[in-house]
Structure formats: C-alpha cells, structure tokens
Amino acid sequence: MSSVYSGRLQSKNCGKGIENRVRVLALGGSGGMGRFAVRTAVAFDSIERVVVADLNAEVADDFARSLGPKAQALGLDVTDQSALRAAMQDVDVVLNTVGPFFRFGPSVLRMAIGCGLHYLDICDDWEPTLDMLAMGSQAREAGISAVIGMGASPGITNLMGLLAMRELDSVEELYTGWNVGGAVPEEESAQSSVNAAMEHGILQMTGTVRVRRDGADSMVRPLEKVTIHYPGLGPKVARIFGHPEAITFPHHYPEIRTSLNIVHGMEAERWLTLSLRSLVDWRLLTKRGAARLLGWLERQQARLGERNLTDPAELPGVFGLAVGKKHGQKASVGVAFKEVSDVGMGHATGVPLACVLELLARGQITERGVFAPESGVIDPLAFFDLLATHYPEKKTQDKANLDFRRSWEL
C-alpha cells in the first residue's frame, strides 16, 4: 500500500503474545452481549477455560453448564473490589461486557492493569473511553495489552474506517456510521431491569457529546443533522450520535480534522426519539425510565415485519468513510459489508470481541498499552477474515466480506 496509514499496521515488537491455552474471566459473561462472546470463545482451541462471571450466579451457572467443560460459573458483583481482585487471580485475560461502561469501564480496567492482565471490552461510551485511554502508560508499564470498544460500533466500524484510511495518501475527515433501525436489542440477564444498550443510547442522545470538527474538539448536541457524500450514493442525511469513534480516531491520528459517528435509518421515527430526549432534558422522565421505554419500543418494532438492511440506495448498515486526498486530488473511500447478516446486537457485538481475543491468544497483538481498535494493534484484514467464519450462513467462508467504494473508480 502506498498510503501512510498502511505502515501503522505493523506492530512494534514490545513483547511476546500470551501463551496459547488462555484462561479468560468473562465479566457479564451470561448477559445479552457477553454470552455471544463467550459462546464463540469456548470454541477456539486457544482457550483453556472461561470463567462466566455474572451478578446473577444462577444465570451464570446455567449458561456455563450449557457450554461444556471449558466453562465455569462465578457469581460476582464488579463493584466489590475485593471480590473482583480475587476473580482476576489465575486468569490471563479479562473480557468485560458489563455495561453501561460509564459506570463500570475505568474501574475494571484499572483493576486488570493492577493484576497484570490483558483486557478487552465493548465500551461504547465516549466519556470513559477518554479515561481509559489515559491509562495507556500504566498498561505499558504493566506489560499488558488493552483494546477498548471492540464490538460492532465501536469496533467493526473502527476497523472499516482504518481500511478506508489506508486507501488514501492523507485523511481530513473520518465518519463511522450504522443503521439504527437495524439494531435489535438483546434481553439482558436478570442483573438489571434496564437494558444497558438502551441506557447507553439515551445517555448519548441527551446533553452534549464530544466530536472532532474542523481541527478542534467540540461539544455538540447529539442528533444534529449532517450530510455526507458516500462514494456512489451521493449526498445522504444522517445524525450525530455520541460514540467513542469520534474521539478515538483523532486520538490515534491527530491529523484528522473532522471525526464524527453518525446514525441513519431513524428519520421516520425521529419525532419519537426527539420527544424522548426532550422529556429527559425537561426532567419529566428519568434516563433509566426513557431507556426502559426505548427498549420496549424497539422490541415491538423488531417484531413487526422485516427490516430492510440492504437497500442499495441508502447508506450501508455499518460503514467507515474516509475523505482526504489521493495523488494530490480530493478522494473518498467507503468500506462496508458486501452482505449484511440479520443478527441481533448481541451477536454483532459479542462475536467481534471474541475474534480479537483469538488474535490476542495467537500472539498477533503485541503492543502494550490502551488502544482503540483502529490504532494499528489489530490487523483489520486478519480480523475480518476470522469474523467471516462466524456468521450462520457463511460457515465455509474464510475471507473478509467487505465492499470498498472508491470515488476515483466511479
């Protein structure tokens, strides 16, 4: 590749990969997201044992029993520091899917660093992402690798954005996005009466969120309308959503002047979303109450008819878009899936996390510190090749299911 970004995929050899036959502590391992990560992970030969830890010990035990001899259950409250420290003994990696991450992300990572354990999570809140990235020096000193935000968005979107960046000589704008209408919520375990994904969604639609715009960090009102030009599709309307991608791309690549995470597919129901936000802002409805209502509404919507995730005239279901220059000319590249699998949020989020666990176990992640997925510590093509083998209709597929749209080829 001629791009300046391709060289960043070569990890500095800061240490050996962890040994095979890895022992994993899966926090929230029987929850709506964690169970998909755990179920995928136990099938890997590199995994010796997975401790399924959940606040609800009975749910964890039932799930662990269903997975066979590699899994064992543990009742655990992650807010109990002594119990959490004890749970981190005799394991190699912490897999954290306990949300919302603005409550549980930084404290768990801090404990993992203190115990000298590698760490992976699906953090989708931008505020704790900043706090965890700031722990990079401590993680390096402890000799551990921590990859945060490794689900669907963030996660898959970051690696798509990185692949798009690799196609260009320089990048000025970076957009990650997804179809909010395609997000099917998972039922959580009994540890919470509120779906963590819905609570996260309400948090990121209210108040203000941080983005990079015109070379400066800015606090903006979420759901602001923006227009992007996706190669081959022309101008498309989307809305700003508070997410880590908007801050992690400029963190790792400070030359990016504009970085936004955007959602689409909500224009028909925007009145409902905006109404919920207003009720929260006016303190007529709590964020947790709004999360319960939003979760219920999305489950009802999911039961009504089929969702259209592959309309060729609309933005892709999940994508990364880079805008910059190629051979001195303005250019853009969009990366998305060629085919979209109609799976729920749990599968779309948990399976990518497990795939990165496998890359870590293989010794393919060697840099030490705290990183977002696009940092270069993960080879995106190796990741997508592995991910492609974990979709129900693609069991024989072993190559990345990716569609590149380049403005100079249209």
Image (cartoon, rainbow, N blue to C red):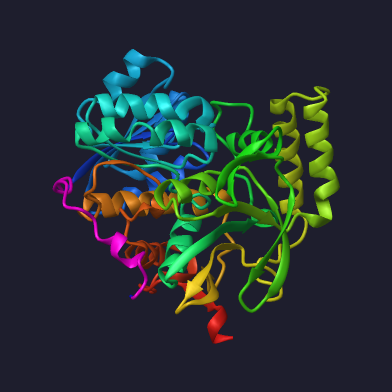
Q: Is residue 142 depicted above or below 299 in this figure?
A: above
Q: Is residue 67 left or right of residue 235?
A: left
Quadrant showing the N terminus: bottom left
Q: Give yes or no for residue 4 being in the magenta stretch.
A: yes
Quarter residue 66 falls in: top left
User: What residue sits 56% from the left and 57% below the top?
Assistant: 176
Please identify the quarter of the rendering in which residue 44 is found. Answer: bottom left
Left or right: 83 in relation to 234:
left
Is the stretch drawn in magenta largely helix, strand or loop? loop
- The reply, left or right, for residue 342 in relation to residue 353 is right
Q: Position of residue 88 (x, y in %)?
A: 27, 26
Q: Which residue shows up at 33% across the image and 67% down it?
A: 6
Vertical position of residue 132 compared to residue 325: above or below: above
Question: How many circles with numbers are drawn on the protein?
Answer: 0
Rendered-image quadrant of the C terminus: bottom right
> Would residue 17 be counted in the magenta stretch?
yes
Q: Is residue 345 above or below residue 118?
A: below
State the residue in front, 193 or 402. 402
The percent coordinates of residue 369 (x first, y second) are 28, 40
Residue 123 in the image: x percent, y percent? 48, 39
Which residue shows up at 37% across the image and 52% down it? 375
Q: Nearer the viewer, residue 164 or 155?
A: 164
Give the answer, above or below, for where 387 lies relative to 52: below
Residue 232 rendering spot, x and y as whole percentages:
64, 79
Query: Which region is colored magenta?
Result: 2-19
What is the residue that sits farthest to the bottom in this orientation? Answer: 410
